[in-house]
Image (cartoon, grey):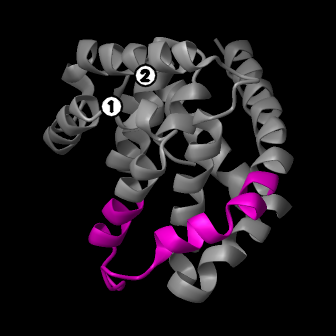
């Protein structure tokens, strides 16, 4: 999953920090953080493992695999954030905006735990309000281009965004089949983490 999903599936402020940190730390570093942040890191990993094994995600990858092969999962993750940001059954538009602002605030308040690379990215994320703007086609286009720019073995002009537009209905169905299962799984994993306290 991508940034919006991971932040939405965090159940405490500390878990928000951990969910974002996971992609920026080595495994052994996780134990240097407070327990609540460690829980976020653990939850991030549980979410990714569940996502990678879900049949609807396997279907969604077929949209992008012909263009980007093994990178398909990264573009599915970005695409799912678009449908999540537009899911008014979970949050109203204002609530999604409030969620985005809360995430930026929490991350800034916990900047002592963030790497310099992450801090630089956070400045851009907050300035352009990535989390809220995933709801827009241009927001997802921007995110897709970011993935292309960072990918070592992909050309920068592969028409991934056009594939997203051309298969939006299929991807929406994949999201609808997938996200309720992921939400239930994340809640169950969080309940287990709370029992360990």
Q: CA distance from mark 2 to mark 1?
A: 7 Å
> Which numbered disc covers residue 142?
none
The span shown in magenta is 144-173
Q: In which quarter of the view is residue 47 placed?
A: top right
Residue under the image location 81 percent in, 60 percent down: 56
Please name whichever residue, 152 or 60, is drawn nearer the observer in this view of the structure. Answer: 60
Q: Quadrant of the C terminus?
A: top right
Disc 2 designates what residue?
100
Disc 1 designates what residue?
129
Q: Earlier in the sequence, mark 2 or mark 1?
A: 2
Please name whichever residue, 32 or 7, is drawn nearer the observer in this view of the structure. Answer: 7
Mark 2 residue element: helix
> In the rendered structure, are the residues bearing label 2 and label 1 in contact, judged by CB atoms less than 8 Å apart?
yes
**Within 10 angstroms of label 1, few (less than 14), some, or many (20 or more) residues?**
some
Please name whichever residue, 161 or 147, is drawn nearer the observer in this view of the structure. Answer: 161
Residue under the image location 56 percent in, 13 percent down: 95
**Within 10 angstroms of label 2, few (less than 14), some, or many (20 or more) residues?**
many
Please name whichever residue, 175 or 3, is drawn nearer the observer in this view of the structure. Answer: 175
């Amino acid at each position: 999953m991508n940034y919006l999903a991971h932040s939405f599936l965090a159940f405490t402020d500390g878990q928000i920090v951990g969910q974002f940190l996971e992609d920026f730390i080595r495994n052994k570093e996780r134990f240097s953080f407070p327990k609540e942040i460690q829980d976020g890191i653990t939850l991030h990993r549980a979410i990714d493992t569940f996502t990678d094994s879900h049949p609807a995600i396997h279907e969604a990858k077929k949209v992008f695999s012909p263009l980007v092969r093994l990178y398909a999962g990264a573009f599915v993750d970005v695409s799912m954030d678009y449908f999540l940001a537009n899911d008014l059954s979970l949050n109203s538009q204002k609530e999604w905006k409030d969620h985005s602002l809360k995430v930026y605030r929490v991350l800034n308040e916990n900047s002592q735990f963030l790497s310099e690379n992450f801090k630089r990215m956070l400045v851009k994320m907050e300035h352009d309000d990535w989390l809220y703007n995933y709801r827009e086609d241009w927001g997802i286009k921007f995110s897709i281009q970011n993935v292309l720019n960072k990918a070592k073995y992909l050309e920068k002009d592969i028409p991934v965004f056009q594939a997203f537009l051309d298969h939006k209905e299929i991807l929406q169905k994949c999201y609808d089949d997938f996200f309720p299962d992921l939400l239930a799984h994340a809640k169950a994993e969080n309940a287990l983490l709370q029992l360990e306290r």
